Image (tube, grey):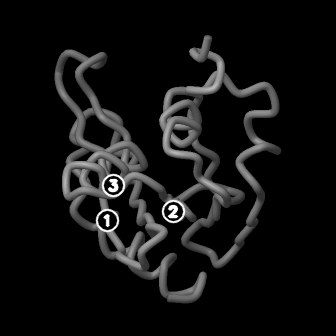
Amino acid sequence: MDDNELIETARKYRERSYSPYSHFAVGAAVLTADGKVYGGCNIENASYPVTNCAERTAIFKAVSEGAKKIDTVAIIADTPGPCSPCGMCRQAMAEFHVDNVIMANLKGDVKKVPLSELLPYTFSDSDMEG
């Protein structure tokens, strides 16, 4: 699957967003190391801390289906520029050693960066060793 197809998958999942409070719909799609794709949307809750971001929804779906390595995460929202992931999502991406993050918006702006650029001093499983 190429980047544009992954962005289109994220766009379709954005349409499923449950965002009655913020009205900020986000979609995400992840491509795993074995070539499978999982999508997710943000799911809000009246108790905001219970809300889950689109990126983590897609990551958790992939992991719950057996994926241990995620190559790429694509994110899309109706933002002025490409939609950047929040800090919690960046840390979730670090946990599963995501290589690339594709940030997009509905206007067609796209930026692809390595996770190391978004989270340069990652806390990961290697920090827990020995």
The amino acid type found where label 2 is placed reads Ile
Q: Residue at x 21, y 40 (%)?
A: 20
Query: How far separated are the C-alphas under marks 1 and 2?
Result: 11 Å
Whole-percent x, y for residue 59 in the image: 37, 50
Crowding at dot 1, Cα within 10 Å, few <14 / some 14-19 / many 20+, comes out as many
Q: Is 74 situated above or below 116? A: below
Q: Which residue is mark 2?
A: 76
Label 3 packing within 10 angstroms: few (<14), some (14-19), many (20+): many
Seen at 32% across and 75% down, the residue is 12
Identify the residue position indicated by label 3 in the image: 58
Q: Tell me which numbered mark, 1 or 2, is placed earlier along the sequence.
A: 1
Q: Earlier in the sequence, mark 1 or mark 3?
A: 1
Give the SS element for disc 2.
strand
The answer for how far apart the CA atoms under marks 1 and 3 are is 5 Å
Q: Are marks 1 and 3 in contact (CB under 8 Å)?
A: yes
Q: Amino acid at mark 3?
A: Ala
Residue bearing the label numbered 1: 39
